[in-house]
Image (tube, rainbow, N blue to C red):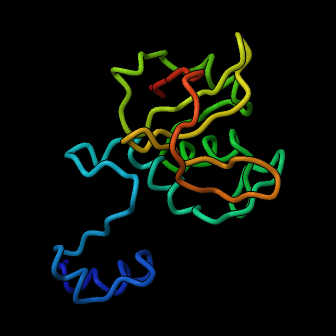
Amino acid sequence: MTALNRVPSLMVRAGTASALTLAAVGGSVVIPGIATDASAATTATKALQVAASKKGSPYKWGATGPRRFDCSGLTLYSFKKAGKTLPRTAAQQYNRTHHISASHRKAGDLVFFHSGSNVYHVGIYAGKGKIWHAPKTGDVVKLQKIWTRSVWYGRVS
C-alpha cells in the first residue's frame, strides 16, 4: 500500500489535517504528547495512542470506555486495546507494574499519584512531564502537565 492510498484513512484519524499535510509528512500523523522515536510499535506506545485518541471523552466514575472513563478505566482500556490486561483500580495497577524511577520513565509508562502510601489516581506518561488522563467528574480526557511530585512510575510488562 502506498502512502497516497493511506491518506483517506489517516485523514479520518487525524481530524482536520489536510491531505497535503499528510503527504508532506509521509502519511504519518503527529499527535501532541506522543513520543516519535523508533519504539512506535511497542505496547506502551500503542496504549498511549489509544489514550490520546480518547481526548475529550467525558469522565465518569467507574467507567471503562469506550466513550466515558475514570482514570484507571482509561489506562485499563488503553492497554487492553494494545494487547495487555491490567486490573481495575489505580492501586491494583500500581501493584501489577514494574516500578521505575522518574529518571527512567518513558512515554507509555503509568504515572501513579499518591498521598502517603495510598495511590489515588493514574495516567499514561506522554513525555515532557505530561500525562493523558481522565481527571475528575465534570472534566474530560486530556493531556496535562504533572502537577505534583507525589507520583510513582510503573511500567507494564
Task: Pinpoint residue 95: horizontal percent, then vertical percent.
Answer: 63, 16
Q: Residue at x 43, y 44 (%)?
A: 126
Q: Residue at x 57, y 23 (%)?
A: 151
The image shows residue 145, relative to residue 157, as above or below, that is below
Front position in the image: 30 or 40 = 30
Task: Pinpoint residue 56: horizontal percent, then vertical percent.
Answer: 63, 66
- Identity of the residue furthest to the top in this view: 117
The image shows residue 34, relative to residue 11, as above or below, that is above
Q: Name the quadrant of the C terminus.
A: top left
Q: Quadrant of residue 9?
A: bottom left
Task: Pinpoint residue 64: horizontal percent, then vertical percent.
Answer: 73, 49
Q: Residue at x 43, y 16 (%)?
A: 100
Task: Pinpoint residue 29: horizontal percent, then vertical percent.
Answer: 31, 69
- In the picture, measured across the screen, residue 149 lies left or right of residue 18, that is right
Q: Quadrant of residue 42?
A: top left
Q: How many marks?
A: 0
Front position in the image: 137 or 44 = 137
- In the picture, measured across the screen, residue 148 lies left or right of residue 73, that is left
- In the picture, measured across the screen, residue 3 lies left or right of residue 63, that is left
Q: Residue at x 41, y 21 (%)?
A: 102
Q: Quadrant of residue 147?
A: top right
Q: Name the quadrant of the N terminus.
A: bottom left
